[in-house]
Image (cartoon, rainbow, N blue to C red):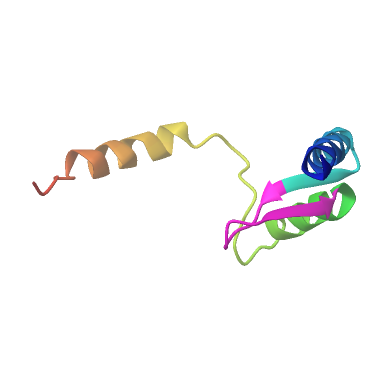
Amino acid sequence: MLSLILRKQKKTALKELKSNKDIVIKPADKGGAIVILDKQFYEAEGFRQLTNPKYYREITAPLEGHTLPELTISYTGYTINE
């Protein structure tokens, strides 16, 4: 009987967490764990990383005309070792 009560409580707790719009629930990068983060922190950290000029730069124009020919050349030269 205690097992049934605990399962019901876990289910209720998970529903409450899932419906909370102030948090973000994501799988951890490593270890298979689940991480619960404050939504404002999560968004601020994402913005901080994306605005780091060491890793990212703003694209001011579409790249399709420049990138597609390069991808086609790379793909054409690619061979699969069987």
Q: Is residue 30 magenta?
A: yes
Residue 10 spot, x, y in % from top left: 81, 42
Splitting the image into 4 quarters, where does residue 65 fall? top left
Answer whether residue 69 is magenta in the image: no
Q: Quadrant of the N terminus?
A: top right
Query: How far from the left and from the top, in percent, is residue 45?
Result: 78, 58
Q: Residue furthest bottom?
A: 54
Q: Looking at the picture, tell me which residue is in the foreground, 62 or 7.
A: 7
Rendered location of residue 53, percent (x, y): 66, 63
Q: Is residue 74 left or right of residue 18?
A: left
The residue sitting at the left extreme is 82
Picture residue at 37% right of the left edge, 34% below the top: 68
Q: Is residue 44 above or below residue 17?
A: below
Residue 7 placed where, x, y %?
78, 39
Front in this rendered view, residue 60 or 22: 22
Tell which of 56 and 28 is nearer to you: 28
Quarter occupied by residue 56: bottom right
Instruction: Residue at 62% x, 54% y: name it.
Output: 57
Taking the image as shown, residue 47 lies to the left or right of residue 20, namely left
Apparent side of residue 73 relative to residue 13 in the rendered image (left or right): left
Total marks placed: 0
Above or below residue 12? Residue 74 is below
Write down the region rendered in magenta: 26-38
| Side (left or right) of 47 relative to 16 | left
